[in-house]
Image (cartoon, rainbow, N blue to C red):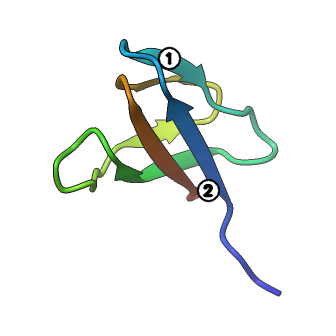
């Protein structure tokens, strides 16, 4: 079975919260594929493993492993 890996970040708080993405060897880079903070839900943001990633208040971000 071949599948993609996803990371879901939920922020139920009213304010933005920073998440730290998992370090390598699991993944070197993540791409945000859905961000419910944006009206269209789409985003093109890429984040490296170990970096901080801000999730806006009362929103969900779905990240897909790219590397």
Provide residue 32's location: percent of width, then percent of height: 42, 49
Q: Residue at x 57, y 22 (%)?
A: 19
Give the camera-side residue of 18 and 65. 18
The single residue placed furthest to the left in the displayed view is 39
Provide residue 11's location: percent of width, then percent of height: 49, 27
Q: Residue at x 21, y 43 (%)?
A: 38
Please tell me whether residue 4 is drawn above or below residue 27 in the rendered image: below
* Contact (Cβ within 8 Å) of mark 2 with mark 1: no
Q: Residue at x 81, y 43 (%)?
A: 25
Using the image, tell me which numbered label, if any, was put on residue 67. 2
Element type at marker 1?
strand
Pointer 1 residue = 18
State left or right for residue 44 relative to residue 55.
left
The single residue placed furthest to the bottom in the displayed view is 1
Q: Earlier in the sequence, mark 2 or mark 1?
A: 1
Provide residue 31's location: percent of width, then percent of height: 46, 51
Q: Quadrant of the N terminus?
A: bottom right
Please rate how many residues cluster around mark 2, counting C-alpha atoms within 10 Å: few if below 14, some from 14 to 19, many from 20.
few
Please rate how many residues cluster around mark 1, counting C-alpha atoms within 10 Å: few if below 14, some from 14 to 19, many from 20.
few
């Amino acid at each position: 079975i071949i599948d993609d890996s996803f990371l879901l970040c939920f922020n139920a708080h009213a304010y933005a919260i920073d998440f730290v993405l998992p370090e390598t060897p699991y993944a070197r880079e993540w791409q945000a594929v859905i961000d419910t903070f944006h009206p269209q839900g789409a985003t093109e943001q890429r984040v490296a493993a170990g970096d901080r990633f801000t999730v806006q208040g009362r929103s969900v971000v779905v990240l897909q492993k790219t590397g």
